[in-house]
Amino acid sequence: MEVMFPGLKAFFDPDRKCDTKYGGTIVLKRVWDYLNCDSFILSAGIQKRSGIPASSLAFSYVLKPLMDAGSISRTNRRTRGDELLKGLIPDHDQCTLNRFVNGDYDWNGLNDLRILKLQRRRRTGTLERQRHHRCLLLHRVVVMEACHRTRSNR
């Protein structure tokens, strides 16, 4: 079975163990595309760095915890050494990623856009409303139990 990411020249064959060490990358990339994170980055005015698209650099940085890379240097080394990641993220040096992450961009604006867009989406907005509704119900149950205990102790 071969999986191709739309718009990318990256293939993954699950039977070939040499394709990637980071299987969660596939799931993360699908979530990234589903949430349309590239548009968040563009809307926030975050620009490419050294010819590398901002969305590729951001995705590389987001992979850092998945790769158990404690530093930008280690993130970059692991990205360059993985076949799937090479297909997803254009080759760049550590300096490019470091300058991108530490650049003078409106990261707070990006976060605000992300939250607004997630609240507008039917699926993600509904989940948040459901979570809020469950919290209210739980609060009511706790209050009712407390009232019942108070009445029982009289």
Image: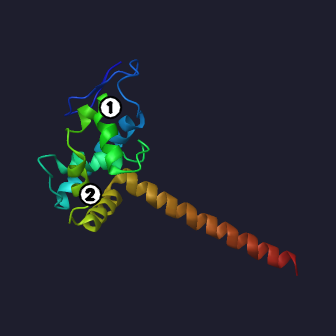
Instruction: Please say if 24 is above or below 11.
Output: below
**Residue at point 31% right, 63% down?**
111
Q: For mark 1, what is the residue?
A: 82
What residue is shown with label 2? Answer: 101
Residue 105: name its quadrant. Answer: bottom left
Res. 35 in view: no
Considering the numbered disc 2 on the image, is that residue within a helix, a strand or a loop? Answer: helix
Q: Residues within 10 Å of mark 2 (few under 14, many from 20)?
A: some
Of residues 146 and 1, the one drawn nearer to the viewer in this rendering: 1
Q: Where is residue 8 in the image (x, y as percent from the top left)?
A: 21, 33
Task: Give the farthest residue toward the left.
Answer: 51
Quadrant position of the C terminus in the picture = bottom right
Find the residue positioned furthest to the right.
154
Classed neighbour count for the residue bearing mark 1: other residues with Cα under 10 Å, few (<14), some (14–19), many (≥20) = some
Towards the viewer: 32 or 89: 89
Whole-percent x, y for residue 53 in the image: 16, 47
Write the residue at 86% across / 75% down: 152
